[in-house]
Image (cartoon, rainbow, N blue to C red):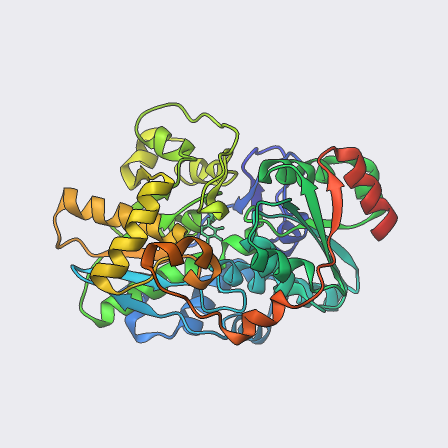
Amino acid sequence: MKFISTNKKSEPVSFLEAMRKGLAPDSGLYMPEEIPVLPDSFWSSVGDLSFHEIAFEMAKPYLKDELSDAELQSVIDDTFNFPVPVKSLADHHFVLELYHGPTLAFKDFGARFMARLFSEKARKEQQEVTILVATSGDTGSAVAHGFYKVNGVNVCLLYPKGKVSKLQEQQMAALGENVTALEVDGVFDDCQSLVKQAFTDEELNDGMQLSSANSINIARLLPQSFYYAFALAELQKKGIGQPVFSVPSGNFGNLTGGLLAMKMGMPVQHFLAATNVNDVVPEYLNGNQFKVRDSIQTISNAMDVGNPSNFARIQHLFDYSDSAIRNHLTGYSYNDEQTRETIREVFEEEGYLLCPHTAIGYRAAKEYQKEKGENVPLVTLATAHPVKFRDVIEPEINNRIEIPERLKVWLEREKKSVPIHKEFKSFKSFLLAEFR
Ligand SMILES: *Cc1c(COP(=O)(O)O)cnc(C)c1O
């Protein structure tokens, strides 16, 4: 299977090559040349399969030229070694809890899968690689943990100073070894722009093998399609039909994973694109132009994205038809006050705790149900464990949230990050000095 750039000017490459490159040379994002459709028999009996079996069947068409069945199986077994519960709330509303991995956020799925593929590739080729990651918090910790002590791979994380939680920062900056954390004097979009510039800088690319691990990486995207099919499987077991998925979104990698599953034949009614006030995509879905903006800081900070990269992939998936995109997706956006209100109400009424990101998805699901009737089965993707955002949540619920022991250890460790400016020059000299 070959992978092509959304900008259509770069050569098609294999999966592992697309993973290594991250961004295509023409600055486009990699997508499969054609999307494999799994047979109806797979989808109609997906409820009989385990998470690992679903992941294997969905990954195989993309990776079969490069990994043996046994290699792929071991990547999958290693990656998904944590539970994926589907909780049932009132009125046909389900929550797909994607936060039971090591860093308590859905990004563990993509980051762990990719880290294990890089490790397979490094083992086969014996070549060192430097991974650059711009993060607004959760990506960085998931990637850092996914790659920690993986042979042949250096990881360099860029996060905006003062804009990630203490715990997120510690989960990136306290690791050391092959993981370097850079504290950038700027916002997330500055971090993302530094990484993009590095990939197009000739001197850097001559001197070292650079690669990305952001949600733009195809190896991060692919596993984010598996859990949609798994949610469908869990509903099938309960005799419930095609759901609507509500996806709290920032850079839109998570939602693109769902659309990929749909293109592989997954039966689904609709998708909800739920954002905070960084509502570039909901605005577009409401009939306006797609217009990128500077990001605005909110309490759902992992979704503070003013220029969502994966929109290019969504356009590609629907052959650049605005009407096709709008037929499959409805946008919702909420401000911080509405987010807080939702956390409070859902805790009081359903006894269920939501992180600020998930709260936005939850609220969109409820609003959609109100419009369409309560028989519509809704699945909200829960993207982070509430404990990661307890500063926001505790005042709303008038209750303490206990920090699990496995997280507490991070808060006590030494922070080892390196401060840098948002100008490309200082980032470049750091890279050349450290990794060339
Ligand atoms: C990254 C993240 C999101 C946004 O996901 P995208 O794939 O960037 O749309 C939402 N919630 C949490 C907790 C995240 O870490």
Would residue 158 appear left or right of 75 to someone viewing this image?
right
Q: Nearer the viewer, residue 41 or 284?
A: 284
Q: In which image quadrant can residue 29 be found?
A: top right
Residue furthest top as drawn: 289
Q: Nearer the viewer, residue 403 or 306?
A: 403
Rendered position, 285 above or below 225: above
Question: Can residue 320 be seen from the camera position used here?
Answer: yes
Residue drawn at (84%, 41%) of the image = 429
Please state the horizontal and vertical placement of residue 342, each as a whole percent of the image. Answer: 29, 50
Residue drawn at (40%, 66%) of the image = 400
Would residue 433 appear left or right of 50 to someone viewing this image?
right
Question: Can residue 37 be seen from the camera position used here?
Answer: no
Quarter of the image for the N terminus: give it.
bottom right
Q: Nearer the viewer, residue 342 or 28?
A: 342
Would residue 396 appear left or right of 306 to someone viewing this image?
left
Please state the horizontal and vertical placement of residue 384, each as a whole percent of the image. Answer: 44, 59
Residue drawn at (39%, 37%) of the image = 318
Give the number of marks. Answer: 0
Rendered position, 271 above or below 16: above
Would residue 129 appear left or right of 84 to someone viewing this image?
right
Q: In which image quadrant can residue 100 be found?
A: bottom left
Residue drawn at (80%, 37%) of the image = 426
Please state the horizontal and vertical placement of residue 175, each as a whole percent of the image. Answer: 70, 65
Rendered position, 279 above or below 408: above
Please state the horizontal and vertical placement of residue 289, each as a whole percent of the image. Answer: 39, 23
Q: In which image quadrant can residue 410 be found?
A: bottom right
